[in-house]
Image (cartoon, rainbow, N blue to C red):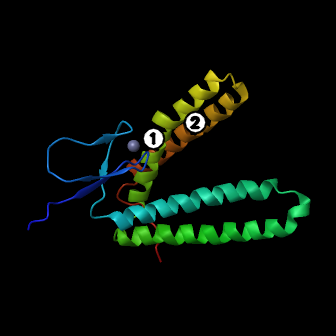
Amino acid sequence: MNEQPQDIYKCSVCLKEVKVTNNSNGTLICCKREMQNITFDRLGTFKLQSLKQKSALVQFLNILSQQMPKNQQDNKAAVDDLIQKNSKVALLLAKEIAVENQGFDLNKLLMNIIDDLWVSILIDYPQYIAQASFESKLEIKKLLTDAFELDRRALNTLEAILYRNESTLEFDAS
Ligand SMILES: [Zn+2]
């Protein structure tokens, strides 16, 4: 019996996965974006997700650490230790991803981050800001607008780096 190829596609926005059981033309769209074929690179996708998750966790722990009151010094030490260890794991994951791409440098990671920034600028933040506007929460609206502007600046900077250094940017994977 012949197995039909079952390509797996993933939405980079909502992370939904679908299995395609018969071949047909056309592109799969989810969250207004083309879904990516991850059939032969599931582990690669997971490593990237793990890197994102660790990075987000480190960010949150940093905020937590800065907000902890004096009577929480013992817990603060534990949080700081977690920040250090999670940062280390994130760096190892980034190196692993770079090595797997044959020293193909930071470009793939950079392109992924740029992709995420586009999603945040085109889909996420306009939605957040519209919600704050709708609820007349002007302070939050301003905060979210500032966050949106920061993403735009990050996008501009990262795109400039990507396009200028496409052939030379290398990640030190040693
Ligand atoms: Zn989706």
Q: Residue 119 carries which label?
A: 1
Front residue of 106 and 27? 27
Residue identified by numbered label 2:
148
Vertically, is 111 above or below 29? Answer: below
Vertically, is 26 above or below 95? Answer: above
Indicate which disc, 2 or 1, sits on the residue closer to the N terminus. Answer: 1
Which residue occupies 57% across, 33% down?
A: 128
The answer to which quarter of the image holds residue 3 is bottom left
Q: Does the residue labelled 2 lie within 8 Å of ligand 1?
A: no
- 31 horizontally vs 72: left or right: left
Query: CA–CA distance between discs 2 and 1?
Result: 11 Å
Residue 31, how many percent across, how many down?
Answer: 39, 38
Q: Please tell me how crowded label 2 is: few (under 14), some (14-19), or many (20+) other residues with Cα within 10 Å.
A: many
Residue 35, how many percent across, how many down?
Answer: 31, 46
Which residue occupies 59% across, 56% down?
A: 56
Q: In which quarter of the image is ligand 1?
A: top left
Vertically, is 80 above or below 109? Answer: below
**Secondary element at image label 1:** helix
Residue 104 seen in the figure? no
Q: What residue type is labelled 2?
A: Phe
Q: Check the image and name the residue furthest to the left.
A: 1
Q: Check the image and name the residue furthest to the front.
A: 1
Q: What residue type is labelled 1?
A: Val
| Residues at discs 2 and 1 in contact (Cβ within 8 Å) | no
Front residue of 78 and 2? 2
Quadrant that contains the N terminus: bottom left
- 82 horizontally vs 13: left or right: right
Front residue of 150 and 56? 56
Which residue occupies 34% across, 64% down?
A: 42
Q: Please tell me how crowded label 1 is: few (under 14), some (14-19), or many (20+) other residues with Cα within 10 Å.
A: some
